[in-house]
Every structure is written in structure tokens, then in C-alpha cells.
Image (spheres, rainbow, N blue to C red):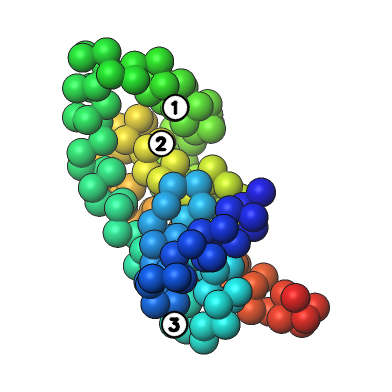
Amino acid sequence: MVESMVTALVAFFSKFLSKEMVVFIVSLLPIIELRGGILAGYALRLPMITTVFFAVIGNLLPIPFILWFIEHILTFMKSHNILKNLIEKIEKRALHKSAGMANTEFLALMIFVAIPLPGTGAWTGTLIAVLLKMDKKRALLSVCLGVLIAAVIMTMISYGLLAFLGI
């Protein structure tokens, strides 16, 4: 699923953006995030270091904004009945994914973000941190470390395993 989304995004964005900007933009997107950005860089035949740089920066850029502003935005939207049901569904899903994180929140959040699966990246991890009322600086550090670990994992998969298999 993610691969087909990345393929479509690469085809669309590469018509009018540089390869580096394609990786950056794909990495900014929720759900796809860095995992898709690194796959996009590999598909675009960008050098590994260039891909990782733009994917990490793209994935990390929205995190401080989410940490410091999402709670206010969600509260405003719910109080004005703007997408209230959708917001409550997202909050419920994020809280469900965070079950068991309260005691070891820093390490658990870092591992959660590092797992290279859709829905376990920096966006969801940051939302979980906000919903758990985690200290923002600790949450930021935990998410950043998780993104860096995810970058290592995805780079090994994309530039190691896929290259080895000739894909």
C-alpha cells in the first residue's frame, strides 16, 4: 500500500520538483513519512546520504508544531464542532496505540516511532505524546531519536536489501 502511494507521489511531484524536494515533501506527509521518503529517494536513484538527509529533515519539520499547537487546534475544532467525530476517532486510536506506554514513555515512544510501519511514525508518536501529556522536550527528543533509528532501518532495507535483490 505505502509503496504504491510513494510511486504515485514520486510520479506526480517529480514533474515539477527536484528529486531532493520530492523526498522532502513525501517525508513531510503523515502516514507515509520518512519510510516513504527513503523509498522515494531510492526509486529516484538519489545518493543514500542525500536521501537520508532530506527524508529526516522532512519528517522532523512538523514535529515541533504538532507538539506545541495540536492540542489547541483539536480543542478549538471540537468546541466548534468541526470534524469532531473524526478528531475523537483519531484521539481514540492514538490512545489505544499508546496503551502501556505511561511508565516507560520515553523509550516506548522512541521504539514506536522507530518501527518502520505505516501509522507508527513521528506524526502518530507526537500525537500520542501530546495525549499522554508528556513533557514536550522529552517527547521531542524521543521522537527525534525514533526518526533517526527508522532512517537507519529504512536505509538498510532500501539501499541494502532492495539493492542486493536488484529491485
Is residue 147 among the parts visible in the rendering?
A: no
- Residue lying at the far front in this picture: please name it: 15
Judging by the rendered image, the residue that carries numbered circle 1 is: 90
Helix, strand or loop at label 1? It is: helix
Q: Amino acid at mark 2?
A: Ile
Q: Amino acid at mark 3?
A: Thr
Foreground mark, 2 or 3?
3
Is residue 60 among the parts visible in the rendering?
A: yes
2 or 1: tag closer to the N-terminus: 1
Q: Amino acid at mark 1?
A: Ile
Q: Position of residue 45 (x, y in %)?
A: 57, 82
Q: Quadrant of the C terminus?
A: bottom right
- How far is mark 2 from mark 3, CA to CA? 30 Å
- How far is mark 2 from mark 1, CA to CA? 10 Å
Helix, strand or loop at label 2? It is: helix
Q: Residue at x 24, y 22 (%)?
A: 77
Examine the rendered structure and indicate whether residue 103 appears above or below residue 54. Answer: above
Judging by the rendered image, the residue that carries numbered circle 3 is: 50
